[in-house]
Image (cartoon, grey):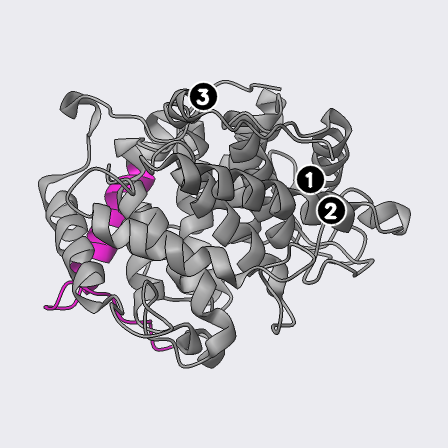
Amino acid sequence: MHHLIRSASATFILLGTCCVCWWPAALRAESVAAGRAVDAGLRRLAATQVVEGPNAGSWDCPRAEYRPATAGLAGLAFLANGSTPAEGPYAAEVMRTLRYILPRMDSDGYVGQGDPSGMYIHAIVLQFALGCVGMTGDPTLEGELARWCERAIAVIERAQAIRRNPTERGGWRYTPTTNESDMSVTSWQLLALHAARQCGFEVRPDLIADALAFVRSAYLEVEPGRAGYVYRPGISREPEPSVTGVALCIRAILDRPDDAQTAATLAYLDSFPPSWGGDQYKQFYFLASFYLAQGMFQVGGPAWERHRAAVEEVLVARQSGDGGWPFPPDNAPQTKLTGPAYPTALAILVLSLERQYLPVYQRQRPLY
């Protein structure tokens, strides 16, 4: 095992300060309308959480396999707005979510079992669990949570070690045993590993280095001064806006991107302003919007301010009267199987970026 498990409750409290940070109100620069939309969305998530029975702590989900991922995203939405399993206005909801998540792991440490794209589920749930480390106020639960996270991290390590062809080496795709890689799944695994290191778990440097090499290989120039990132290096022929957004995010946090490449990427993304649906989202509107917002937020400056104003306007206008968000008409039909909490949680995460409660989503200089 390559990770640190710390059993003393005092150490968990120290680690917890790395996982959820309380920032002064002056740093929360979202518009008043966006702040109200977030508050209404959080109330909606709290009101619709299952509170009894075997699925207590989750949300209604037409496809059972997606339920842990939807719960993880909803839990992250609460964490991203200052609640923890022990404190804050939604502490009870966060704790319920955590207690729902922990038993979902199989004997090998995997949380995506039963779904052909389960590595998404695994990384989303792990990010939520890592956000709760040191925050439960229960030493026994902290020990269980640390061991759970260690096992989940080991799954990501083993999955990357599967032999791949040179163009796909260093990445991840849908299952822990595949020899394929793509930028979307890889981004979730990298953010989970980043969160793990922030919480005191050891992650081998070569794991990060190999994954970043894969991310860099996805860069593709469209024309002089305009470039993006492709979904599958060596296979995809054109860049995609959402993949480009998440590559910006990953490289800003974990890498030292070339300024000229960043400028060319921003020039490419200028052609895809936020809207309610459209071809740029590839029928996965909320996930793609999350990727794009994360990338632009990490870049910061005028590019982020323009993007933020536009995406806030779109999302605030499309919020339902009950505080949730619907899917755009052109969204992929299978996404609706995640249930109504899924778009609501992702919309909240997009609108909450400036609050910067979770270090994994904070704008920062590279750490590694």
Contact, CB < 8 Å: mark 2 with mark 1? yes
Q: Which residue: 59% across, 63% down? A: 112
Mark 1 falls on what kind of element? helix
Residue 109 pos. (x, y %): 65, 54
The Cα atoms of the two marked residues, 2 and 1, are separated by: 8 Å
Q: Which residues are magenta?
A: 306-329
Rendered position, 280 above or below 247: below
Q: Which residue is tagged 1?
A: 215
Type of the residue with mark 3: Thr
Mark whose residue sits in front, 3 or 2: 3
Q: Secondary structure at mark 3?
A: helix
Visible residue check, residue 291: yes
Task: Assess disc 1: are there few (<14), some (14-19) or many (≥20) residues with their C-alpha within 10 Å of its C-alpha.
Answer: many
Magenta region includes residue 136 = no
Give the x, y percent position of residue 313.
20, 51
For residue 320: magenta? yes
Circle 3: is it few (<14), some (14-19), or many (20+) Cα within 10 Å? few
